[in-house]
Image (spheres, grey):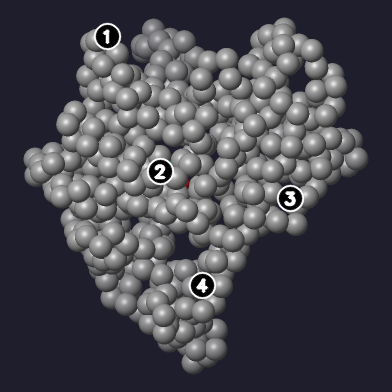
Amino acid sequence: MDRAAAAPPVSIDTINPKVLKCQYAVRGAIVSHAQRLQQELQTSQGSLPFDEILYCNIGNPQSLGQQPITFFREVLALCDHPALLGKSNIDALFSKDAIGRAQKILDLIPGRATGAYSHSQGIKGLRDAIAAGIAIRDGFPANADDIFLTDGASPGVHMMMQLLIRSENDGILCPIPQYPLYSASIALHGGSLVPYYLDEATGWGLEISDVKKQLEDAQSKGITVRALVVINPGNPTGQVLAEENQKKIVEFCKNEGLVLLADEVYQENVYVDNKKFNSFKKIARSMGYGEEDLYLVSFQSISKGYHGECGKRGGYMEVTGFSAEVREQFYKVASVNLCSNISGQIIASLVMNPPKVGDESYKSFIAEKNGILSSLARRAKALEDAFNSLEGVTCNKAEGAMYLFPRLHLPQKAIDAAKAVIAAPDTLYARRLLDATGIVVVPGSGFGQVPGTWHVRCTILPQEDKIPAIISRLKAFHEAFMDEFRD
Ligand SMILES: Cc1ncc(COP(=O)(O)O)c(C=O)c1O
């Protein structure tokens, strides 16, 4: 049969409209432009006012020079090439506890084969190890059957959206600003994003009365709200929730029958002494709530923390509170993807069970871990101070995560100039910043923001020796921008 007669052509007009609706600014137009500039730098040196592109758009630590944790990579290398364990000089090349851990992990893997598919939830022995790590973290028991190992947190989030969203009449409460995985995934699955606003004036606080109001608003429009997303520590906003606040969220989800989708991928990234990460599971259990009281899904990732193993794609979700029937459906959906990759599974088990006091690697592991986290804290502070020193810019503290989300109080002239080129004012700012300095940030419009406010998101990830140059370029750019547009 003639191809044209058989079916409508595959064109932009005929692909799934949900795909067209989906947006993901973290890798959007500004980043594509940065990649073009990078090409230009390579082909004609000296053609631009800077000599390198500084990617502050995405939480991808190793792409900016962060070194992987030695112990994790030693164990991984040995698991992936077990023949090394039989070499006579192995003790000279690998630490004793990495050798011991790799042997233990290989014993947990059916056939000792990292190249084989595993159980669809992940290798049982690794899930046992992760559950043990969660129990130590929280002081409450965890169960390997509740763990679903995933290729990073993102596929876990997609899976939950797939399970929860039946039509556009199903809503998911999401923070605004939010990490655009959530808006993108809700759009792809055909649901409705129900926004609740974080309050910038109180350090991106989450007001439960606002969440309730948004829930009721959505319900009055015929939306069945199914879940509440909380990102703690926050992305792009960097706040760490206080325990009292978390208790209110748990209470709210319990009372409203909402699934609490707790994005806890930045649980190791807390930079202030007066705040501490508490998992929502720990909070719920410490309030006396068990399985039957709350639907709770916690997402963890190997991409963040001090390890930043983004490219290895590993993570897990811990799923509690659902009936056995529903759990079977979770398992069925997981099994359609066969399994998550085994390197990611191994690293996830190491992240939740790092070397302990007395292990040979302990000292060097802690030195690497603390070195990275304290450097991140210094970088966060230096960039926060720099943003706050700029005319018309205010920036909350990054208590955690990997980002600053400064607010740009832009002059009307800049807003008008953006309108003239049909761009959001923060997109104009980000584009100008990139063209002048090579610094890539993401316009706040990609995360959602209170209408009429403008922000950019800047990661704190460039290596420490690059921060002074970034700050001086940023300051010079901002002054020139304000001189051009000041009202
Ligand atoms: C809040 C949050 N959740 C989830 C993810 C997904 O990360 P991954 O899929 O690499 O685990 C990210 C990545 O930046 C994130 O910032």
Labels 2 & 1 near each other (Cβ < 8 A): no
Q: Residue 366 — which label? A: 4
Residue labelled with disc 2: 241
Q: CA distance from mark 3 to mark 2?
A: 28 Å
Quadrant that contains the N terminus: top left
Residue in view at x 75 percent, y 52 percent = 466
Q: Classify residue 330 as left or right of residue 99.
A: left
Identify the element where label 3 is drawn: helix
Nearest to N terminus: mark 2 or mark 1: 1
How packed is label 2: few (under 14 Cα within 10 Å), some, or many (20 or more)?
A: many
Ligand 1 visible in quadrant: top left
- Is the residue 102 above or below the residue 410 in the image? below
Seen as rendered, the residue at the extreme bottom is 88
**Whole-percent x, y for residue 101 in the image:** 37, 77
- Is the residue 481 above or below the residue 294 in the image? above
Nearest to N terminus: mark 3 or mark 2: 2
Q: CA distance from mark 2 to mark 1?
A: 30 Å
Mark 4 CB within 8 Å of ligand 1: no
Q: Amino acid at mark 2?
A: Leu
How packed is label 3: few (under 14 Cα within 10 Å), some, or many (20 or more)?
A: some
Quadrant that contains the C terminus: top right
Q: Amino acid at mark 3?
A: Ile
- Is the residue 244 above or below the residue 138 in the image? above
**Whole-percent x, y for residue 211 in the image:** 33, 25
Q: CA distance from mark 4 to mark 1?
A: 52 Å
Residue in view at x 40 percent, y 43 percent = 241
Mark 1 CB within 8 Å of ligand 1: no
Residue labelled with disc 1: 221
Q: Amino acid at mark 4?
A: Ile
Nearest to N terminus: mark 4 or mark 2: 2
